[in-house]
Amino acid sequence: MRACLHHIATDKRGAAAAEMAIVLPLLVTLMFGSFEIGKYFLDAHRVQQAVRDGARFAGRQGFVDMPCGGTATADPQIKNLVRTGTTASGGTPRLTYWTNPATITVTITCASSGTYSAAGIYTIVSGGARRVTVDAAVPYDSLLGIRLRSATINARSESAVMGI
């Protein structure tokens, strides 16, 4: 009997499996957490790049099409460019879950006073120097398809309206 207990106490054949069973949940959590963080940063980069493209496109619109404090004539095109990368309606979204164009806002502001308000190309337009701001607030969709209310990717870009 004593020899049997001694044999059981000194047997180490299952030690690696027991240690792996203890450590495996932590390793899996770290692995999926790393993937999730990487996906979040990639998606945030795509949204920032999209907003920057939209601001550049909006900055190339004519002064008449970008009224002070109003809505841009090309507003649907700007929003579609931000969301899909093309000005034509439809298109594939840059992010598979970015289906709502209402997450994008285009704001036009005019500087009626200051150094640049009536200088250079802005001497020919009323209202002064125009600046367009493109904002996006995209609800983040995780790898597992779980939508968290507080997880939102926010991006903003501004551009001076140069006219055509």
Image: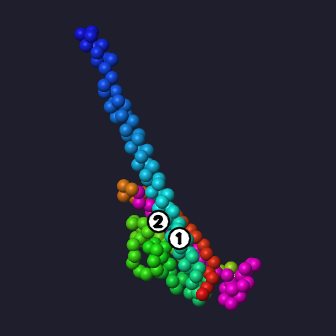
Helix, strand or loop status at disc 1 = helix
Q: Residue at x 46, y 72 (%)?
A: 83
The picture places residue 8, in percent across and down from the top left corner, at 28, 18
Q: Is residue 98 above or below residue 7?
A: below
Residue placed under numbered mark 1 in the picture? 51
State the extent of the magenta-drawn residues as a range.
113-142
Q: Residue at x 39, y 66 (%)?
A: 96
- Alpha-carbon neighbours of circle 1 within 10 Å: few (<14), some, or many (≥20)? many
Quadrant containing the C terminus is: bottom right
Q: Earlier in the sequence, mark 2 or mark 1?
A: 1
Residue 139 appears in the picture as rendered = yes
On the picture, is 96 further left or further right than 132?
left
Q: Residue at x 30, y 13 (%)?
A: 6
Q: Residue at x 59, y 79 (%)?
A: 59
Q: Is residue 143 above or below residue 55?
A: above
User: What whole-number distance in Å separates the C-alpha atoms at marks 2 and 1?
Assistant: 11 Å
Residue placed under numbered mark 2 in the picture? 138
